[in-house]
Amino acid sequence: MQTSNAQGSGIKSVGSAILHVRNLNLMVSWYGDILGTPITEIESETPYYVFEMINGVNLMLDDHRFMQDQAKHPIFMLNTMDIEASYNWAKQNEITINLEIQHVHPGLSYFNISDSEGNVMMIIQSNWVNPNSQQLNELDKPIVNHINSIVVPVTDLKRATEWYAHLLGHVIKPDRQTGGPIYWFDMENGTGVLLDDNRSNGYCEKYPTFMLKGPDIEEAYRFIVSKNIKTLTEVEFDNHFFISDPEGNSIII
């Protein structure tokens, strides 16, 4: 990978988690239930649904009905303030570009890239504001409307860490390279990027791609059990556990 353009990629924050689903209506109902979020009408021609989150890093469920020809779909979005500059940086640094810049409408543009592990992500510039924004309370539910981290499944943790450090303009912190299965990057809007080689997650049908926040992890676990939702682990290290949604996607709470 060549290094050029001293100002970097211009990417400082996460925009959204994206979960590919088969049955949009079913999955919207399921996620709305665990998040305690009222569901608005899903228009029949719309292939996605967005759950608004507290810090602006939303959860998008997308059935990609108009993108059946794509082998892989994006698993998250990263924000940029200048789509052209970020695109040029990606090309100069020999980043794999899966989709050229799409100017959807004034104020919304994006392009897709692949990381060193083959994961696809969207780089997006958007000034869209939800006209029907809901007032969200972070602490009044067992699982709150907050994506704690994007979780990126990787094969080679060292290679992926170097790739993301370059993309995000971060210096790698040796104290986070402990020989364990993860490395993480703190981002400006409070939702981080967590790399996980999943060496201990063989029980997952599909590896997790995001982490939801539970203010009290024991209360969150009891809540999930009371909903008869499939748990993949009990509470581990007093701070997280794994569950599975109806389509087999793993989620970290």
Image (spheres, grey):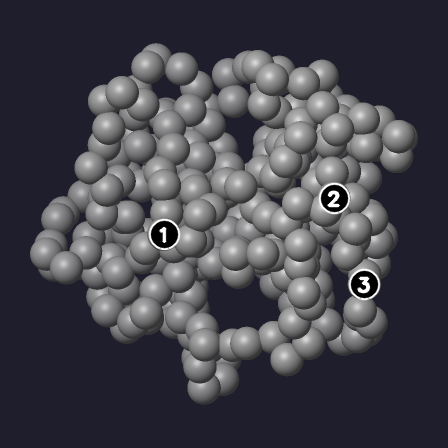
* Residue 106 position by quadrant: bottom left
Residue at image mark 1: 188
Callout 1 amino acid: Glu
Label 3 secondary element? loop
Residue at image mark 2: 141
**72 on left or right of 179:** right
Residue 143 visible in image: yes
CB atoms of marks 1 and 3 within 8 Å: no
Callout 2 amino acid: Lys
Q: Which mark is first along the chain, 3 or 2?
A: 3
Report x, y in % for residue 4.
11, 54
The residue at 71%/17% (across/down) is: 234
Report x, y in % for residue 231.
77, 24
Report x, y in % for residue 202.
62, 17
Callout 3 amino acid: Ile
The residue at 72%/51% (across/down) is: 21
Q: Which mark is residue 39?
A: 3
Mark 1 vs mark 3: give the one in front. 1
The residue at 28%/48% (across/down) is: 168
Residue 223, compared with residue 145, is above or below; it is above
Q: Which mark is residue 56?
A: none
* Residue 237 position by quadrant: top right
The residue at 79%/75% (across/down) is: 43
Residue 206 visible in image: no
**101 on left or right of 165:** right
Separation (CA) of disc 1 from disc 2:
25 Å
Q: Nearer the viewer, residue 133 or 83?
A: 133
Q: Which mark is first along the chain, 2 or 1?
A: 2
Label 1 secondary element? loop
Report x, y in % for residue 67.
61, 63
